[in-house]
Image: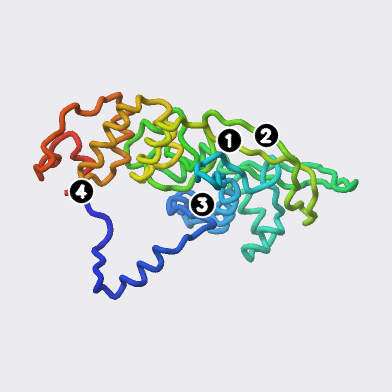
Amino acid sequence: MKRGYELGFDSPAYMIVHEVGSMHLEGNIIPASWFEHLRYDDGKPHVNAILILSEVVYWYRPIEVRDERTGRLVGYRKKFKGDKLQRSYGSFAEQFGFTKQQVRDAIGFLRDKGVITTELRTIEVNGTRMNNVLYLEPVPERLKQITYPHHTSPVSDMGAGPSDLQGTPSVLQNTSSVLQNTPSVLQDHSYGSVEQTNTEITTETTTETRMVAAVLTDEQESVLVSLLTMGMDRLVAERLVQEHDLVNVRGWLTVARRSASLKNKAGLIVAKLQAGEAPPRSEPAWNDPDRYISGEYAEFIEH
């Protein structure tokens, strides 16, 4: 089944859709599935909790660090300065136009749903002791359950867990998720500052963590670039070139490239490599327009 509707040059919507598509939109992301899973007892979506969760998840989404000379990914950084995100009820209230009680209720709701954890700490700021400083942290497994209700192990922004690449190819979409299960992570610590406390005081106290990506060989890097052109998530692609025979990876790349009707080229490559299947040794009849209508690749084709 085809997605969307035709958009011809003579369509009144063409320029608007084109201009919106050219925008690089950043910020909070709210998956539609949250409105199904985060509801009051009467069945209505808890919009306040959804907005606050989107803010918490935004702060836990990683920032890519690239080499300015080569453009290669060299690691990741986090947006917040402590070991956990530290925010006050008042800061959420000011940001979203809620009352502090509405914020408390929403955070308590998210905590009861198991989507986030909260921690109240006592810290010392410039010699002043401060109590009940709020720290928040998402729970990745529970967050995945409400974000991807039909997939138990979706692919995240920063890669895949042990079973993430074993699902159906349809999970290989450019979705935003939370940091977890990243292999071969090295950490180094430098001192930064707590962004905000419950009394809105900025300090110079905690740690910052940088995650360094694995170094690839030139051959692996070459194959990686080819996988990225297929629309594959970078960390998924990196994992494939490190864990699989590059001959097989290149072979399935060739298969995917040569079939214009494949709607999910990246999905085919991942599925075949994870199944341990070797690419075909002889080229199929590429000029036959019906070659994949009923064959083993039929599920990847838009007819």
Label 4, label 3: how far apart the Cα atoms are = 41 Å
Q: Tell me the crowding category of disc 4: few under 14, some 14 to 19, or many 20 or more residues within 10 angstroms, Cα based.
A: some
CB under 8 Å between callouts 4 and 2? no
Closer to us: 15 or 131: 15
Label 2, label 1: how far apart the Cα atoms are = 9 Å
Which tag is nearer the camera, tag 2 or tag 3? Answer: 2
Kindly tell me whether residue 208 is visible in this rendering.
Answer: yes
First along the sequence among labels 2 and 3: 3
CB under 8 Å between callouts 2 and 1? yes
Q: Residue furthest front?
A: 69
**Mark 2 lies on residue:** 188
Whether residue 242 sits left or right of residue 187 in the image: it is left
Task: Tell me the kind of residue under disc 3.
Answer: Asp
Secondary structure at numbered mark 3: loop
CB under 8 Å between callouts 2 and 3? no
Q: How many marks?
A: 4
Query: Which residue: 14% across, 35% down?
Result: 295
**Mark 3 lies on residue:** 41
Residue 273 in percent (x, y) is at 32, 29
Label 4, label 1: how far apart the Cα atoms are = 39 Å
Task: Indicate the quadrant where residue 200 lies.
Answer: bottom right
Q: Which mark is residue 302?
A: 4
**Mark 1 lies on residue:** 212
